[in-house]
Image: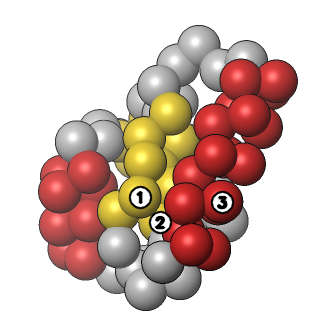
Amino acid sequence: IGVTGIPAELQRLTRSLGFLYEIVKKPGQTNYEVAHNVHIALINPQAEYQALFRHPHDARKLLHDFKLILSQVRKN
């Protein structure tokens, strides 16, 4: 699930995770782009930081690691 919200809250969250982003508005356009790094943060149901998957992503490795993390979480 992507993150959205009030800019000050987003900045506090992204800085705490070490993520960078920038809102890019082009002159004369109402739409904007968000430039950001491509890491994936895994946040558990208790809203705690669980893991960070850095770029480049490999789907098989992500799935493997996610299953390992999930099995540990279920044990607790």
Q: Residue furthest front?
A: 75
Q: CA distance from mark 3 to mark 1?
A: 13 Å
- Tell me the residue that label 3 is attached to: 71
The first of marks 3 and 2 along the sequence is: 2
Type of the residue with mark 1: Gln
User: Counting other residues with Cα less than 10 Å from the Cα at mark 1, is it few (<14), some (14-19), or many (20 or more)?
Assistant: some
Q: Are marks 3 and 2 in contact (CB under 8 Å)?
A: no
- Tag on residue 43? 2
Q: Which residue is mark 1?
A: 50
Q: Dot 3 lies on which element?
A: helix
Distance, label 2 to label 1, CA atoms, is 5 Å
Q: Is residue 5 above or below residue 14?
A: below
The mark that comes first in sequence, 3 or 1, is 1
What's the amino acid at mark 2?
Ile
Q: Which mark is residue 65?
A: none
**Foreground label between 3 and 2:** 3
| x, y percent for residue 30 | 59, 58
Q: Secondary structure at mark 1?
A: strand
Q: Give left or right: position of 67 versus 11.
A: right
Badge 3 amino acid:
Ser
In the rendered structure, the answer to whether residue 22 lies left or right of residue 13 reads right
Residue 47: x and y, percent?
40, 80
